[in-house]
Amino acid sequence: MMLSRMNKMKPPYRITGKILKMVASISEKIGEVNSAHLNKPPTELRKKNRIKTIHSSLKIEGNTLTIEQITAIIENKRVIGPKKDILEVKNAIAVYDYLDNLNPYKIESFCEAHGILMNGLIESAGKLRSKSVGIVKGSEVAHIEPPSEMLNPLMNDLFDYLKKDEDLVLIKSCVFHYEMEFIHPFIDGNGRMGRLWQTLILKDSYPVFEYLPIEALIKERQEQYYESLGKSDNTGESTFFIEFMLEIILESLEELLNIQNVSLSNIDRINLFKSIVKNDYFTRKEYLKNFREISSATASRDLNFAVENGMIVKIGDKNTTRYKYK
């Protein structure tokens, strides 16, 4: 099993009927999310889901802070708790705030993210481990990681797969998550990095994944999460883990779509439209076409608000009016 990962080759897995069904269902749900203008959820929902993500990911690793305490830290309030746990939360907040600056296809960004996530927690934050380690469960060694001298070629091969292979992004994100956990490139922080990087890979193609609380669903099914990793270890391929993670992804999209009475604020609409038009010029008519549920007057108020607050620039007058994001 280990030798297969020490040769430059595509990571092993099988496309099962379950995987095909999950991918089709996820693609359908992403379409529904886009139609409902939820590809960038409302501000309050994004904040709530980010807190759930940080809480769940760190809870899996043994952090004791509550959602209320994490919320207080985000709001710069004083929190009483173990110093290590508070630092873990502050680091997680920092790395999630930094997501837009990270490139999911570069190992340099990967190490930079680990440096932020583990800053002050381990001496080798941001650096691949320089010694061999094993995972111990009870009194037995459950998994011996590849030797440290193999880390650079193994991780470079994994990033090559991520960048160049024609697999669907949904599948590649799961494969990367599993293979990275198997390689165990860092002394500590591998679990949270695997989950973070899968989010980053998905976010690059589907912005909605930046704010989906996938970690919270993993936490709820933590035993199955580790069981799927173990099954994949035993079979020498990531198939079981891919199936599990696709189930989690589908469930997270379904939860988002099940939210009742979601209403976008003017700022939500303005920010969402920016992600659609990017740097292109647009008209009020084009803005309104994207938000059919609002009136022409509301569209005008949105755009006037954005102009007055320096978010967009207005060019021309009356029928020749065009807008562009700064």
Image (cartoon, rainbow, N blue to C red):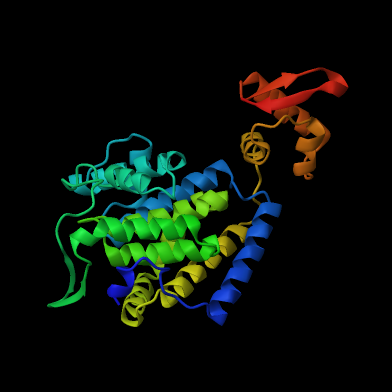
- Residue name at image x 34 percent, y 78 percent: 236
Quadrant (top left, top right, bottom left, bottom right) of the N terminus: bottom left
- Residue name at image x 49 percent, y 57 percent: 164
Q: Nearer the viewer, residue 174 or 33?
A: 174
Position of residue 166 measured from the top left corner of the image (x, y, whole percent): 54, 62
Quadrant of the image occupied by residue 281: top right
Tell me if 256 is positioned left or right of 245 in this view. Answer: right
Quadrant of the image occupied by residue 42: top right
- Residue name at image x 37 percent, y 71 percent: 225
Tell me if 186 is positioned left or right of 309 in this view. Answer: left
Residue 298 versus residue 215 in the image, above or below: above
Position of residue 202 measured from the top left corner of the image (x, y, whole percent): 51, 55
Q: Nearer the viewer, residue 312 or 10?
A: 10
- Residue name at image x 44 percent, y 45 percent: 103
Position of residue 81 measured from the top left corner of the image (x, y, whole percent): 21, 46
Tell me if 66 is positioned left or right of 244 in this view. Answer: left
Give the farthest residue toward the front.
8
Residue 261 versus residue 288 in the image, above or below: below
Quadrant (top left, top right, bottom left, bottom right) of the C terminus: top right
Position of residue 52 measured from the top left corner of the image (x, y, whole percent): 42, 53
